[in-house]
Image (cartoon, coloured by chain):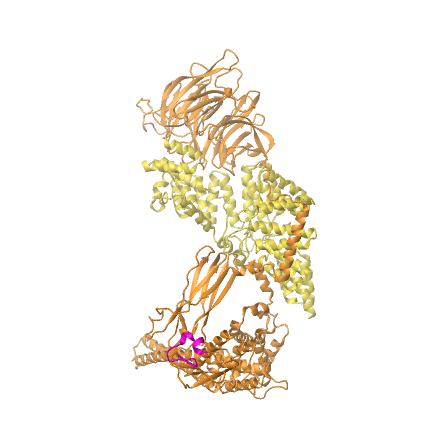
Amino acid sequence: MSLFQTNEWWASNQSLGEECGHGCLCVANIDNSSDGLCKVITGSYQGILRMYAPTSESAHQAHDVLIEMSLQLPILQLAAGKFNSVSPDLHLAVLHPRLLVVYKVSMSEGAINHGNQYKMDKVYQHKLERTAANMTYGPFGGVQNQDFICVQSMDGALSIFEHETFTFTRFLPGFLLPGPICFNPRTDSFLTVSSSMFLESYSYQVLAVATDSSKKEESQSMASGKKITVDWKFNLGEFVLEIVVLQLSTGKSVIVVLGERALFCLEESGQLRFMKKFEYNVSCFKALVSSESDTIRTIICTHSQQLLVYDNVKMKWAAKLRTSPNNLAIGNFKDTNGLLVLLTESCQVSCCFLGTAPTIFSLPRSKQREIDIGTLDERLNKLNTVIAKVQSTQGDVIISKKETEDLKVSVEVPKILDKKSAASKYSGPEIPSISVQVLLKVNRRVTNVQLSIESNPAIHCTLQQLSLQELTESEHPPSIRPAFYLRQDFVPSYLSQDVTVHYQQTTGIPKVAMATIKLPLLLVAKNAAPVKKLDHRVTLESNMACVNLMEIFADFCCETSGPHCIGFEYYSGPKATILTSKTSNRYRVQCDTYDGLWLITNELVDRLRALRPDIHLTVQDQPSLEEYAHLIDLHYQLRVTREEIRLVLEQRALQFRAIQRRLLSRFKDKTPAPLNCLDTLLEGTHTQILAVADALTENEEALKMCSCSLSSATRLIVLLCTLWRELSEGEAETLSAVLCVNQTYNKNNMGWEEMVDIGITSLLRTSMSSKSGRDPNVTSAQHSVEFPLDTAKLKKHLMILMDKLAKGAHLPSSNTKKSTKPKYIEKPKQVHSKKTNDVNTFFDDSFTNEIDSKENPYANLDGMLPPDDLVYKHGKKVDCLESPNYSTIPNGNLDEEDEDLPLYNGDHLQYETPLDVRLPPSAITDDIESPLYYEDTDIFS
Amino acid sequence: MDPLFMALSYYKRRKFEDCVTTCTKILDKNPYDQAAWALKAKALTEQVYIDEVEADDQGIAEMVMDDTSVAQVSRPGTSLKAPTSAGVNQAVRPVSQSGRPVSGFVRPGTQSGRPGTMEQALRTPRTAHTARPVTSASGRFVRLGTASMLSNPGGPFINLSRLNYNKYAMRPNLAKVLFEYIFYHENDVRNALELAALASEHQQFKDWWWKVQLGKCYHRLGMFRDAERQYKSALKQQVMLDTVLLLGKVYQRLDQPLQSIETFKQGLEKFPNESSLLVATARIYDGMNDVENTTKWYKDVLESDGVNIEAIASIAANYFYSDQPEIAIRLYRRLMQMGVYNVELFNNLGLCCYYAQQYDMTLKCFERAIDLANDDELADVWYNIAHLALGIGDNTMAYQCLRLALSANNGHAEAYNNLAVLELQRGDFERAKALFRSAAELAPMSYEAHYNQATLAEAVGDLQSSYISALKATKAFPEHVDSKDLLKKLKQHFTNL
């Protein structure tokens, strides 16, 4: 980063395919011309030596090149010095891997203005026994006006050549890789950096003297030398690129070392003068002594194409280079002194000077073109109207319709059943299965796809859950074919299955897509011979002539069925028949079991309505509750049994633990005592526990089945009521919600009976109550959900409900603006507040057990806790509930000393959950106006 | 041409890949060539080298479970953990998410700062792109280590488990190369420490370099006191820049900024005008929220190193926040002339131009910034444009800009806050409340959202929430007068009740 850039004064041509390294540049008046102008000499690893005389500011011209010749051998280093014993002229030393040659460069003047001719004459050469790494030169041993050459080999031998004669070879101690080498004439010593990152100084005298007695002075003298002692050494702590020795005006010299990460300046005796840490990677440098202040000026080139000038450690100048050079020199050329000569890796030389020309950093053109104000305005207005429209129609810009359709689920139910039943491996009698194709259509890439199929107690599905890492629009959607088949001995209460797919959009917003699989009746029932008379029957009346049953139940026809009668048989046993009257417009459905009626009746109604959209079906009589009550009793009985078995199980487990404890203490006792048959007792209890657990499982299975039947029956009741009183769809929905058609089987201690009872009670007391006041028959105070003592009350309430319906009362419809949900949330509150008024008259014992029933769900069966602190509870509760701010006060702010509240909250939640499930999604979004909702959408935008 | 010579030449020209290939060839021929072996190790090291002085990522574990600091409850002005807010007014200079004043230059550590709580530590710094904060300092080094494995498709170059460290410790020329390879390339601090300890012993504890390396190892292992001892011992032998800097870093980790500054000052006596020492000092003052000294030291840096971008940017930021946008413009322009070309620069220039009333340039600068920005930066740019829009009174534009900011980065607390104010102006009370809440949750250290929440709650009579929020606001910015007034008022209300 720099403000200025260097100005190029002259540059050589690009030379292709050449490479050069450190030391391949030499700037000197090599031809010893009288004007003292410098020539630039470059060499390359390809062995090509060039000599330039930069002359003009114009681009490279042919006559700037004085010499260009191939030496055939790679050129490692060039040096200019007084290498001839007889003349004080500058000669050029060229280091090849195995050869050191000294040339004399001379010029012979041309006759006319065509220029001069330069030539190189070999003065002498030395064959090297070892591969050379680099060299240095100087007046070794204090000779005057002469330069000797010292070559360092790759394996750490220093060979000294005094002009034409080879003097000696010495090995450097502890050598690994050749470091830079430099000669300090003032102290007559060599400076080099060892592989252990020390700057070491070796005196020439020491080197010369350190010989063996054998006076063989061959360069092959392997490890023969004595140990060379180092003058001094300085621990630099890093590897070094270059070493330079400078002469100060005071006569002293300083050593400047360019390390990889810092610049060091040392006294000639090896003390640190200063150092400068770099923030960049350096490539080469040139150090000078400033004439006026005796400070060290360094010019440093970096690999990030910068040229930095330091005065000691202060930065004086920073300029940008066009290239990153690996050799830097300073030379005086025609008309201009002190030009920087840079050599790049590809052997291109350029002469530069620092100027105040700024770095021309032109900003890239911005993408946007200037458009005139008019069109801009127009576009802005258009966009604004779009935004306004979106905001007004959708409320929030961030939720757009498009996003919800990233993934679509669709199902394809085949007309025919599977040829090979998936159920065959489980059960002996043939139960058919059906494989449904679930299709996931992806419009945009989605991740974390989770597909789940709702479990139906009566129908088994081969696939419950499926997780996919991601789906993209391009790839073929996976083929999902879950198979469904009937569980043995079950009569299902519904045939539809919900498929839910959760997925995440690429933006991270989680979404849900749903589809419903409608399984065919064929899956659970098969054709059978019609039976004239069966126990349970339902009669439907229509306003049109009876249709041909063979026609609408074509898939169930058999040889015994006719246009007026058709038979069915569930795979689980019950038989059913549909009969039509030849004279009147009546259909009769009859079945062995009451719950078996439901699916057939429902199917009949559906198919009739599909065939004749304007058909009007009614039921004349009030649906009979007797058979229904029987089922309720059965269900209730099974639940009671379950609780009893659980109680027994608990007792047995307690007993088991007690025996264990006793046994343990027996065994631990230091003085052994007889076991007193405790082991037999333990074993017996264990067997009992196992037996009880088995019984529990069995009962559970029976309960499941009974629940399924109950669900079917309840649905039938709802259907019949609907047809009987011609209820609207919304009313029917409310009725089925009240009767909890889905929650007939619950694992926890809150059962169907209680829920339905509460639902009916509140329905009767609120929307269906006559204006005159409370119906005396309805116990208004249904306080909490708990195990009912018997089903009589429920049955009574059901009767009342039927009576009311018969009298023409209307149910609240869930389709109205006031949806059922808020009502359900409110209901428990009202119940609570009212109830406490006459708490002593109704169900006092069970009510007070509310708390205990948390821990021990069967405590109410014992009915033993006396009411103790009713007043206290009463007062507190009403206060809290009627507080107008209830919804805004978070839980934490409620009085903590009121120990009932958390419990209340717990119950409250329990009310909510089952009801929540069945609400259509639209109702949820309508109701929740909490601020958090918006916040979330913002976050996911 | 000698292959080893070429390899060395490649190394000097920083063509490390070529160097490694050449060395590998030599080693294939002669597996016992120590020179080639050392050169290859050097080249591999240099490829992944990071100056230990600069590598300063502190993970959650280091910051939260910090038991190295000398004083757990330190006196004001002597700790980096609880810096005094003297000289920095939050109302003037905004704070980053961790509650430090916005610095002019992003370095490792400036974003995360020293969080007070675990929750805060877990929150990702705004500029981080991963969802996970740096869990531990070693995590980064492990990543570097695995990255370096990639460069060696044939498996590791040196099998550390088979090395006989005793043997190598006796050979100083190999040991140093090997140490750097183990430390930087393999990131195996334990083995490096073993080698360094043996080598240092073998040198009769006379080589300061080994002591510094031991110190580095101890530092990485979290043994700061041992590191300090090694560095001090090394300094007794030879005062070197790196040692001073590393010693200062140790004191920084020990939460003794003053000691650290003292070390640097001693270093400066030995190496006057050394910019790395000056920068390090300035950074510590920055960490202590001492804006005046920070600027002074950064100016000193510029004296000795006129192209130091960190110094220029920091000084410019300070000028900007001390209401001298014109000078800040000049400094930023200087940066641009020097070739800095990024979102931050254009964004800052745009803001300076806006406050210096050079409106014509403002939009152009922001336009450029948007062109260059990626998501997180984009959010900041849009947020600033929203400021501009508010300034010229175009509330609709401000609203849209803030929405855009949020769509670019949904964790932009400031944008939430301002959006909430705009919503409030529009009369959508509920939304404003929700937005304030998100803003306060996202940036608990900035007082604005808390104060806004408090005023809003007070306006609707929810005195309790108002009180809580006002307390939070005063905690974030103790000198905030409005919050204090509100608190006073609330207290009066409560006593009346």
| Residue at image point 46% right, 61% down | A440
Judged left or right of residue A225, residue A848 is: right
Residue A618 visible, this orientation = yes
Residue B470 is situated, as x and y percent measured from the top left of the image, at 64, 61
B19 and B117: which one is in front?
A: B19
Residue A634 is situated, as x and y percent measured from the top left of the image, at 43, 84
Residue A255 is situated, as x and y percent measured from the top left of the image, at 49, 29
Farthest-out residue, top: A111
Q: Quadrant of residue A386?
A: bottom right
Q: What shade has chain B been given?
A: yellow
Residue B293 visible, this orientation = no
| Residue at image point 58% right, 64% down | A933
A861 and A243: which one is in front?
A: A861
Judged left or right of residue A566, residue A366 is: right
Q: Is residue B64 magenta?
A: no
Chain identifier of the orange chain: A
Image height check: is A555 above or below A223?
Answer: below
Q: Which residues are magenta?
A: A548-568
Q: Quadrant of the N terminus of chain A?
A: top right
